[in-house]
Image (cartoon, grey):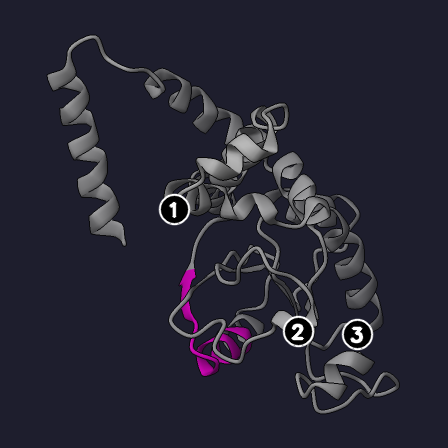
Amino acid sequence: LAEAKAIGVIDGTAVDDVPAAICIAVPTGKIADCVANMVARYSEVPVFDVGSVKTPIIESLRARGALASCYVPCHPIAGSELRGVREARADMFKGRPIVITPVDETARAVVNVVVNWWQRIGGDVAEREPEEHDRIVAATSHLPHLLAFAFMEILADVDEADLRTHIGTGFLDFSRIAGADPIVWSDILYDNRESIRSWVEKLLERVSIDADKDVLRRRIERASALRNKLS
């Protein structure tokens, strides 16, 4: 907090005051504990998280009777592999998807307040079911990270000088997210492992080089067209 204040990321701290809102920004494996603690202390204050996995957190809170009406599960799909307060950006959420996954216990009035906050900083808010969120983000975020980590693992035994001689933009683009925080990503991959596994199975069916070059070309054309459409 002292560093954040010193470089102007925050205006100040007020740890003894009742907060207007509570944002839980910790690794996914710690979110349920933090939410349970906060809703017990501040039952009238909106509490939201920014974790990349939703269902395990919600199930954990429900099992312990701590799924409070003031809690709104959120996932801003923004940021990068960089970390630390010095990587903070005022425009981080501008134009970025913000997925919220309220459940039956969530008060709609609190949802509206949290949605308004995200929109005021430029976020594009969408509401989804927790399970659907976890299934899709497993493909769009978690599987790519798993592949990047695994890719770097298989290169660990290759001579570093040889690697550097052959590194181009393809390697840099593909491997960038392998530099992400190990604590954050071990939690994410573990917590959403079932959804990720289903996509891994689909991927293994496609990781092949066809004997017919024309078939291979058509596969690449379809993949390239979809990538260009989504970018």
Circle 2: residue type: Arg
Quarter of the picture containing the N terminus is: bottom right
Residue 132 location in percent, x, y?
A: 45, 43
Dots 2, 3 in contact, CB < 8 A: no
Q: Residue under circle 2?
A: 86
- Label located before the other in sequence (3 or 1): 3
Q: Is residue 136 above or below residue 96?
A: above
Task: Name, please, the residue furthest toward the right.
Answer: 16
Asked which quadrant contains residue 40, the reply is bottom right
Number of callouts: 3
Task: Name, please, the residue furthest toward the left.
Answer: 214
Q: What residue appears at the point 80 percent right and 54 percent down from the top-left corner? A: 33
Q: What residue appears at the point 40 percent right and 43 percent down from the top-left corner? A: 168
Q: What residue appears at the point 28 percent right and 15 percent down from the top-left corner? A: 209
Residue 162 location in percent, x, y?
A: 53, 30
Quarter of the picture containing the C terminus is: bottom left
The residues tagged by marks 3 and 1 sit, at their Cα atoms, a distance apart of: 49 Å
- Nearer the observer: mark 2 or 3; the answer is 2
Q: Nearer the viewer, residue 191 or 209?
A: 209
> Crowding at label 3, few (<14), some or many (≥20) Cα neighbours within 10 Å?
some
Q: Residue under circle 3?
A: 42
Residue 201 location in percent, x, y?
A: 44, 20
Q: Residue under circle 1?
A: 169
